[in-house]
């Protein structure tokens, strides 16, 4: 295989991919089916899309890059580009578009799905169709996670996903209990990671990689110590109690300006009552879950906490080394807990990582010991995305994939997150996966872990 090829075929059969496509479409609809017509549009906010527009965009994106761009088919909807092209339709105008009805949008979703699966069944289909079908399925998975943080932002109730299955699994494969049943307490302490030359990014023979993961290149890492677990809600509450949000010396100039501008005094979905801190979980208020990771905090908040605690955020190279390598000279791992598992063969299971919205929330940071990395870090995949100290940028020799707006427009002003969160679909994750948001965002499912300064 050409190591610079943009479209290597993943090692999955069209039959398995068809199951993923069906599952993703079923999950998309399950995430919105209980919402009213008014909720499907929602208020005009810069951090969310109207959900009626967004589910149509999911179908359009899949059709655009598989059936149309690759196979040369005619559009299913003649107005699709005018409505759903996120590169051309400004965000603030999406509430004003003449969107199809909910029923028409659902029909569009199912029509595209059926046509794509039929195309995959054609033995004469080009190999690139498998890659692009996988790519657009992961795009739908990412939007599914966004649907959930939109519901959190808008204080909509949590969706009922009990019949939505797992990563291509039947509903009965889901865990029988939620986070409360596996509470495991805190997990203090650091692990040591040796320094040396580490190859950051996806290997050229990786079965699947997005453009921003390409390709593995050597970076030098000094020996470092990284926390076994992410920062907990209890630890963040101590920062708040110590006046951390009011101490300018703990914040960067940009972070302090952000904090003052929005009047932040604590994490966004927290409030203080006589009985203590509460956290809004979708449309209900719950007491802080002290040993679960703090979630939905910005990069600025994470940086200020680190300065208060005498710690720092890991670079993304350090994070990837802790997640994927036994030693600086060891073979990289696709999943932290396995030296041999490869992407596309066996997705993470519920005993290894909290993913796929199976538990509809975070678990304690000491839970899921079977998912430990070789160096002893827990929950490097799942539970919460983890902010890193690294600005999102291209790897050496970067070349954009067919969807040029996936990465390149965001280089330079976004910060890298790693690891995935409880709603992230396990079928697409691996230790080289890069997520990215601007440092002010605290609506996404993000937390952080810290490193020692020495």
Image (cartoon, grey):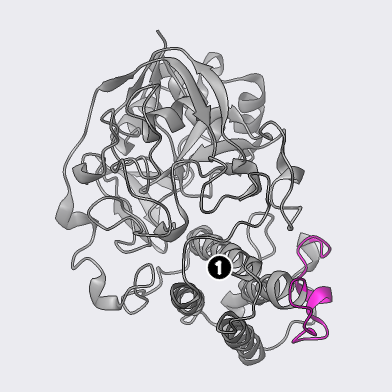
Identified at 22% across, 32% down, the residue is 187
Would residue 364 appear left or right of 42 to someone viewing this image?
left
At x 42%, y 11%, the residue is 453
Please name the residue shown 61% across and 25% down the image: 256
Query: What residue is shown with label 1?
Result: 137
Q: In the image, residue 88 lies at what x, y percent?
A: 84, 63
Please state the extent of the stretch shown in magenta in the rendering: 69-90
Q: Is residue 212 magenta?
A: no
Circle 1 SS class: helix
Q: 90 or 336, which lies in front? A: 336
Does any portion of residue 439 appear in the rendered image? no
Of residue 13 and residue 245, the one placed in the foreground of this image is 13
Q: Is residue 133 left or right of residue 183?
A: right
Residue 88 magenta: yes
Question: For mark 1, does the 10 Å Cα neighbourhood hold few (<14), some (14 to 19), or many (20 or more) residues?
Answer: many
Question: In this orientation, which residue lies closer to the viewer: 235 or 171?
Answer: 171
Q: Please determine whether, in this image, residue 79 is positioned above or below residue 276.
A: below
> In this orientation, does residue 390 appear?
yes
Left or right of 360 on screen, residue 9: right
Residue 175 location, x and y as percent? 22, 65
Is 146 on the left-hand or right-hand side of 241?
Answer: right
Q: Position of residue 96 (x, y in %)?
A: 79, 74
The correct choice, above or below, for 445 with respect to 311 in the image is below
């Amino acid at each position: 295989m050409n190591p610079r090829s943009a479209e290597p075929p993943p090692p999955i059969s069209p039959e398995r991919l068809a199951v993923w496509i069906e599952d993703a479409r079923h999950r998309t609809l399950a995430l919105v089916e209980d919402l009213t017509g008014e909720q499907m549009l929602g208020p005009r906010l810069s951090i969310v899309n109207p959900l009626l527009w967004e589910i149509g965009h999911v179908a359009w994106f899949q059709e655009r890059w598989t059936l149309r761009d690759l196979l040369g088919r005619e559009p299913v909807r003649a107005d699709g580009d005018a409505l759903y092209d996120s590169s051309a339709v400004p965000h603030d105008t999406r509430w004003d578009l003449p969107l199809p009805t909910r029923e028409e949008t659902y029909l569009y979703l199912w029509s595209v799905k059926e046509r794509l699966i039929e195309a995959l069944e054609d033995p004469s289909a080009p190999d690139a169709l498998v890659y692009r079908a996988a790519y657009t399925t992961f795009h739908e998975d990412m939007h599914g996670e966004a649907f959930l943080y939109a519901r959190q932002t808008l204080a909509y109730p949590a969706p009922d996903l009990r019949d939505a299955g797992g990563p291509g699994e039947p509903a009965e494969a889901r865990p029988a209990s939620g986070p409360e049943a596996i509470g495991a307490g805190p997990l203090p302490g650091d692990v040591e990671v040796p320094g040396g030359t580490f190859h950051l990014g996806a290997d050229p023979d990786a079965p699947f990689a997005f453009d921003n993961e390409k390709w593995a290149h050597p970076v030098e890492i000094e020996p470092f110590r990284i926390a076994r677990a992410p920062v907990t809600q209890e630890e963040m509450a101590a920062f708040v109690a110590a006046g951390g949000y009011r101490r300018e010396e703990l914040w960067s100039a940009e972070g302090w300006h952000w904090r003052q501008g929005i009047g932040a005094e604590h994490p966004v979905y927290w409030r203080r009552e006589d009985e203590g801190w509460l956290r809004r979980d979708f449309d209900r208020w719950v007491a802080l879950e002290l040993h679960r990771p703090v979630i939905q905090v910005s990069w600025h908040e994470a940086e200020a906490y680190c300065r208060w605690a005498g710690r720092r955020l890991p670079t993304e190279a350090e994070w990837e080394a802790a997640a994927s390598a036994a030693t600086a000279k060891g073979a990289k791992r696709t999943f932290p807990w396995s030296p041999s598992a490869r992407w596309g063969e066996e997705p993470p299971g519920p005993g290894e990582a909290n993913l796929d919205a199976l538990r509809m929330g975070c678990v304690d940071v000491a839970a899921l010991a079977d998912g430990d990395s070789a160096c002893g870090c827990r929950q490097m995949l799942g539970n919460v995305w983890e902010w890193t100290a690294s600005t999102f940028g291209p790897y050496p020799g970067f070349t954009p994939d067919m969807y040029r707006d996936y990465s390149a427009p965001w280089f330079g002003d976004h910060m890298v997150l790693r690891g995935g969160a409880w709603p992230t679909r396990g079928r697409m994750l691996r230790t080289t996966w890069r997520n990215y948001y601007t440092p002010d965002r605290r609506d996404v499912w993000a937390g952080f872990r810290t490193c020692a300064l020495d």
